[in-house]
Image (cartoon, helix red, strand yellow):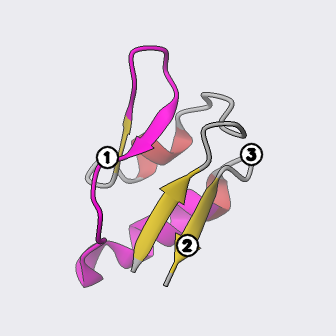
Amino acid sequence: MRVNVDGTKCAAYALCAEIAPEIFDLDDFGYAVATRDDVPAELEVAAGEAIEACPARAIRRLT
């Protein structure tokens, strides 16, 4: 599984980084970035929770 953060949609709520800090980090301005190219199987549930929690719908799952 892969995830992508659309920087044009991210509104810096930072929920993804709180829910899945192993997958998401914040840049210097507080916007989310994915820190892994591939999400390991053991983190897929956390990634899904972060995707669902994003109010801006800035994160999407890539296959």
Inter-mark Cα distance, 2 to 3? 15 Å
On screen, residue 62 versus residue 27, left or right, reads: right
On screen, residue 3 versus residue 8, left or right, reads: left
Q: In the drawing, what numbered circle is on residue 55?
A: 3
Q: Position of residue 49 (x, y in %)?
A: 53, 65
Instruction: Tell me the kind of residue under disc 3.
Output: Pro
Q: Quadrant of the N terminus?
A: bottom left
The span shown in magenta is 26-51
Mark 3 or mark 1, which has the lower sequence index?
A: 1
Circle 3 SS class: loop
The residue lying toward the viewer, choosing from 55 and 35, is 35
Mark 2 or mark 3, which has the lower sequence index?
A: 3
Q: What residue is at 69 percent from the left and 36 percent from the top?
A: 8
Circle 2 SS class: strand
Give the label, 2 or 1, closer to the camera. Answer: 2
Residue at which label 1 appears: 21
Q: Image quarter for residue 10?
A: top right
Circle 1 SS class: loop
The residue lying toward the viewer, choosing from 14 and 60, is 60
Q: Position of residue 50 (x, y in %)?
A: 53, 58
Q: What residue is at 31 percent from the left and 46 percent from the top?
A: 21
Q: What residue is at 46 percent from the left and 65 percent from the top?
A: 3
Residue at which label 2 appears: 61
Q: How many marks?
A: 3
